[in-house]
Image (cartoon, rainbow, N blue to C red):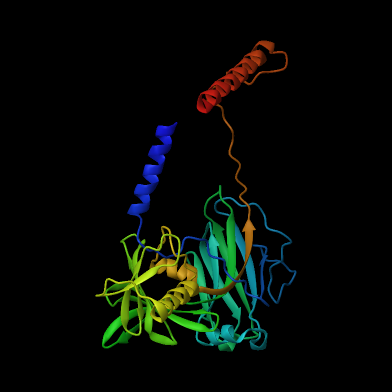
Amino acid sequence: MKKILTLAVALVMVFALAAPAFAAGWDKPVVTPEFEDLYLNITALSVEESTTVWNGGTFNKLDKTYPVVAGMKVHAYAEIQIPKEGDLSKDIVDRIKAGQGTLKISVDNLESVKMTMNGGTKENWTNWTVKNDGTYKVDKTDFGETIYVEIWGETKASDKDAKITATLGVYNDWKTKKVNGEKREYFDFFSGNDKYTIWKDTAGADYVVTSADDTSSGLRFYTKSSGQVENITAVFNGNVYTIQDYMGGDPSFVLVGDNRPIKGDELRNVKAVLDDICGAMGFEYAGDSYITDELVEDNLGTIVEGSASLVYPSGYFQEIVTNDPGVNPPQTGDSASIAGFVMIAVALVAAAAVTVKKVRA
């Protein structure tokens, strides 16, 4: 037992020494803020026309969906009320006016999908055939509007539910612009009212993050091909600092070209840059953490979001067939078979008891 404990401790020390000196990144699930004052509803419709009129059309509303198998048609409509400008916070209004609002209708296990948009101020969905989703950019002209989207489709597989989802959200995304004659990829995001920018492949680093209030300071992230963070350097007033292993406490910083850890006000200022940017991005200071373009979008892309779904359950039932029709479970009166099962159970319990005693020995 002592040998095992000694080996375990040794392994822990080896892995601790092999870990990165300092790492930060995302390793927790993202919690998406809910879009308030939002009305989203998807209603099932009949696939056959009727004399009963719905909303000026010729299809009936259905109280509920029906089981589906491959080749069956589904028909529905989504109703989305975009909140009025006065019902939204200023930051959400500003982002929608900047073109960051998106309405998406996505489908699962449906093919030959056709969506027709009515209402709103644009008609770019009219008779649009899509493979798996349709998107509509919400802008300032859509405040207070109601958008209706009619959806037709056919079930693709019999053993899977068919699903239609409407999602309205406000998002950040990667953009490109020229800086000093070169194209640069960047990603703007907000933490409260403070704006930050992530620059890709800049200053020799994979990602550089700066605050809009102070572009001369920031963090530089260096990653492996997998996206795992290998190292971080901090920049303050144009000076670059390496971040040393902090062994569970506060990190220490060394000015590049100087082997001495910094102290006093300089230390507090550099650490403030680290705390501010890591806090805005939702990073932890240590662990096997990662940064990739996709993780940036997943963790910082969604500002607010709301969704509603309509599910058509699978109507497929698989027949249960035994390999050998001659083998049947014990019937009433088969005392010998029952006794056999009891003996097997007793043997298993006894084996478990012996194993436990050996482990505890």
Q: Identify the image quadrant of residue 199.
A: bottom left
- For the point 60% across and 22% down, the residue is 349
Work out whether residue 325 can be spotted: no
In terms of depth relative to the viewer, which is nearer, 186 or 315?
186
Q: Quadrant of residue 244?
A: bottom left
Residue visible at 54% across and 63% down in the picture: 107
Q: Is residue 67 above or below residue 176?
A: above
Q: Locate residue 242 relative to residue 39 in the image: left or right.
A: left
Q: How many labels, in total? A: 0
Residue 238 at x, y percent in the picture: 32, 84
Residue 132 percent across, percent down from the top left = 49, 64
- Compare residues 38 and 22 and report the one nearer the observer: 22
Whole-percent x, y for residue 57 in the image: 68, 74
- Depth check: give the residue in front, 192 or 79: 192
333 displayed left or right of 143 = right
Residue 43 in view: yes
Q: Position of residue 297 (x, y in %)?
A: 45, 70
Q: Quadrant of the N terminus?
A: top left
Is 1 drawn above or below residue 170 in the view shown? above
Among all residues in the image, which is located at the extreme left?
Answer: 257
